[in-house]
Amino acid sequence: MARAIEKCFEELGKAGKKAFIPFIVAGDPHLEGTIRLVPELERAGSSIVELGIPFSDPVADGPVIQRAGARALSRGYRLADYLSAIREIRKVSCVPIILFSYFNPLLQYGLDNMARDAKQAGADGILVTDLIPEESDEYRSSLERHGLDTIFLAAPTSSRERIQRIAQSSRGFVYVVSRAGVTGTQDALSGTILPTITSVREFTDLPIAVGFGISRPDHVKAVWRIADGAVVGSAIVEQIEKAASSDGFARKIGVYCRWLTGGANA
C-alpha cells in the first residue's frame, strides 16, 4: 500500500502536475497559528508541508528561519507540543506532513519513541538536516518500523558515492539542495541544480524536490521544469514574520503561496 508521500507524487504525475512544498517553522508565530496555517496551505495548493522543528543551535538556517525558530523557542515549546499540533491539524487536513529537524531534538526524545509518536500524531516523514546516511541505521530502522519516510539531502558538493548512498537511504523523495550554504532567498537559481538532479537520477526513481533559495514564481516554474517538486521556505517564513500580528494572517500566507505557484495547484 502506497504511503501518503508516494501517493501524492503518483497522483500529481498522473495529473501532469508538480509538487509545491512550503516550509514553515512550527510554533511561529505560535502553535495556534501553525494549526490554522497548515490547512490554509493545503487549500492554497500545497502538495506536502514541511514543518520545521526549532532548534537552539541551527547550522543550515539563514537569518529569517533562525529568527522564526527563536520566536518559537521563546515560547517554551517542545517536540511533544509540535506533535500535539499535528494531531489538531489532522482533524481538518490530510496534506502529507514532513518534520524537518536537526538530530538532537529527536535523539533527546528517543528515536523509537519519536517515530512512534510522530506517526500516531499524523506525520508522514522526517528529514534530519545534520544526519548523514552513513550514521543513520538506527534512525532509519525506527522510522521504517513505524511507517515513516526518511528524506535525505543531496547537495551540489556531494560526491557521486555519497549521492548513491543518499538515494538508497531515502524514501518518499530525495531533497536536492540548490546551492552550498544556508537557507535564504536569492535572485537567481544556481547552475548546480541540474547536474545534481542528473546525478541523483542515476541511482533512484524516487521523485526529486529542490529547495534552498527558491523565492519567486519564476524560480518555482524553473524548478518544476527539471524536478518533481519545489520547496519554498525562507520567503514564506518571512511573510509569516510580516503578517503574524495582522488579522487573518493564515489567509494572507495562502494568497502569497498562490502567487508563488501562479495558482497552478490551487
Image (cartoon, grey):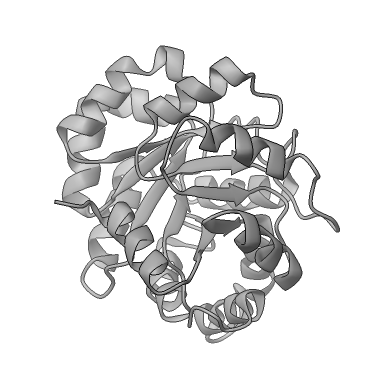
Residue 255 found in image quarter: bottom right
Please tell me which residue is depicted at 77% across the width and 55% down the height of the picture: 185
* Number of numbered discs visible in the structure rendering: 0
Q: Position of residue 85 (x, y in %)?
A: 31, 59
Q: Is residue 110 visible?
A: no
Q: Position of residue 122 (x, y in %)?
A: 23, 55
Is residue 34 shown above or below 45? above
Please tell me which residue is depicted at 36% across the width and 56% down the height of the picture: 97
Q: Is residue 140 visible?
A: yes
Is residue 183 shown above or below 142? below
Is residue 21 shown above or below 251? above
Kindly give the residue lying farthest to the front in the view shown: 202
Q: Position of residue 155 (x, y in %)?
A: 64, 32
Q: Is residue 158 left or right of residue 21?
A: right
Q: Is residue 247 left or right of residue 42?
A: right
Please tell me which residue is depicted at 61% across the width and 41% down the height of the picture: 197
Question: Relative to the observer, which residue lies in front, 131 or 207?
Answer: 207
Q: Position of residue 239 (x, y in %)?
A: 67, 69
Question: Relative to the observer, which residue lies in front, 242 or 42?
Answer: 42
Please tell me which residue is depicted at 52% across the width and 56% down the height of the picture: 228
Q: Is residue 14 left or right of residue 118?
A: right
